[in-house]
Image (cartoon, helix red, strand yellow):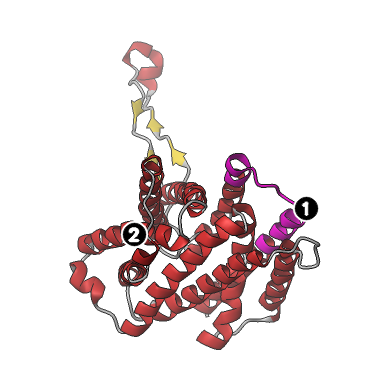
Amino acid sequence: MPAAVDNGGFPAHCLSSCRSDASARSFPSLAVQPETKPIRMTNNTRGYLFVLAAITIFATQDGFTKFLGGHYPPILVTMIRFWAFALFVTMMAASSPGGIRAAIRTKHPVLQSLRGVLLVSEIAVAVLAFAKAGLAMSQAIFQSTPLFVTLLSVPMLGEKVGWRRGTAVVVGLIGVLVILNPTGLHFDLYLLLPLIAALMFALYSIMTRAVSRDDSATTSVFYAGFVGAIAISTVGPFFWVPIRPEDWPAVGVLCICGALSHYCLIRAYGLLEAVKVQPITYLQLVLSVAVAVVFFHEVLTVNMVVGSIIVVGAGLYTIWREYALERRARAA
């Protein structure tokens, strides 16, 4: 799942120039050979590549998370994953302007700390959801997060949601119900786990918006990783079980994926506007479902596919509408 961070770009341009004049045309042997210039990527090109890399790594991370979550306690898997994440954010903060001292400075210490605790708790629930509800089903329900963010932004941030976005949220929530299929004969309460995780991440996103008014992105990412690692380390050791030697490579890949995916996403948001990044992240649903079907032999149902299409469509509309309103406000 995706956790929250910053920027990236795509298509490459091959530039070459060939100079010629009258004498060159008359005497081909005197013609100047084409001067080949190196291929240069635009910021957009690099940004899109970083986004695609991030979602591919996130999907890989989901696969290893499901594998380990099925063999070990979810809290243990989350703790190890957050140790690696904390190391990553510490190195990132140390290399940023002002170093760790600047990253620690915040006008919202309590809210930033709560963000870290909420994020690590959400990931623990997500790991359990992968193991109990299935990777494909969980990812389908996770796509409702932007809808919950829109919904929660009204009471918590005082934002106004017009009838268009309001309708999109209602349609998207209907899509979630289609995915869950609560009237089905085999409805499982474990299906509520990814829904709870989506709500928790939406709340985390709302809190991130609140602190971003005064704190830098580096500060927010640092607190999320560092405080989250401390919080999970207070309970994780009680769930410690020996990890089998053959599973340590999977643990290592999970930790590397956690750092690389966030790095790519941060670079992507640094090169592209959020409205260009967010729609592409929905491809993670396709990749994660492919991992679930190919490697874990999960079965897709009609209600999952139809519901996912409804939820993704509603989410894309809310993202586009929010961007359009923001542009209009800037112009005004």
**Could you say which quadrant of the image residue 175 lies in?**
bottom right
Q: Nearer the viewer, residue 296 or 315?
A: 296
Residue 252 sits above or below residue 309 on the image: above
From the top left corner, tell me how far across and down residue 144 is, in percent: 62, 67
How many tags in the picture? 2
Residue found 47% across the figure and 74% down from its top? 204
From the top left corner, tell me how far across and down residue 60 is, in percent: 48, 46
Going by the numbered disc 1, the residue's amino acid type is: Val
Callout 2: SS: helix
Can residue 319 be seen in this snapshot?
Answer: no
Residue found 45% across the figure and 51% down from its top? 54
**Could you say which quadrant of the image residue 215 lies in?**
bottom left
Task: Answer whether residue 203 is magenta in the image.
Answer: no
From the top left corner, tell me how far across and down residue 72 is, in percent: 46, 54
Residue found 39% across the figure and 77% down from its top? 212
Residue found 63% across the figure and 81% down from its top? 161
Going by the numbered disc 2, the residue's amino acid type is: Phe
Q: Which residue is mark 1?
A: 302
Task: Answer whether residue 292 is magenta in the image.
Answer: yes
Can residue 89 be seen in this snapshot?
Answer: yes
Q: Nearer the viewer, residue 302 or 251?
A: 251
Callout 1: SS: helix
Q: Which residue is mark 2?
A: 85
From the top left corner, tell me how far across and down residue 234 is, in percent: 33, 71
Residue 44 sits above or below residue 200 on the image: above
Q: Is 248 on the left or on the right of 44, as rendered?
A: left
Q: Nearer the viewer, residue 111 or 309?
A: 111
The prevailing secondary structure element of the residues shown in magenta is: helix
Per the model, the C-alpha gap separating discs 2 and 1 is 37 Å
Q: Nearer the N terminus, badge 2 or badge 1?
A: 2
Q: Magenta segment, which residues? A: 291-312
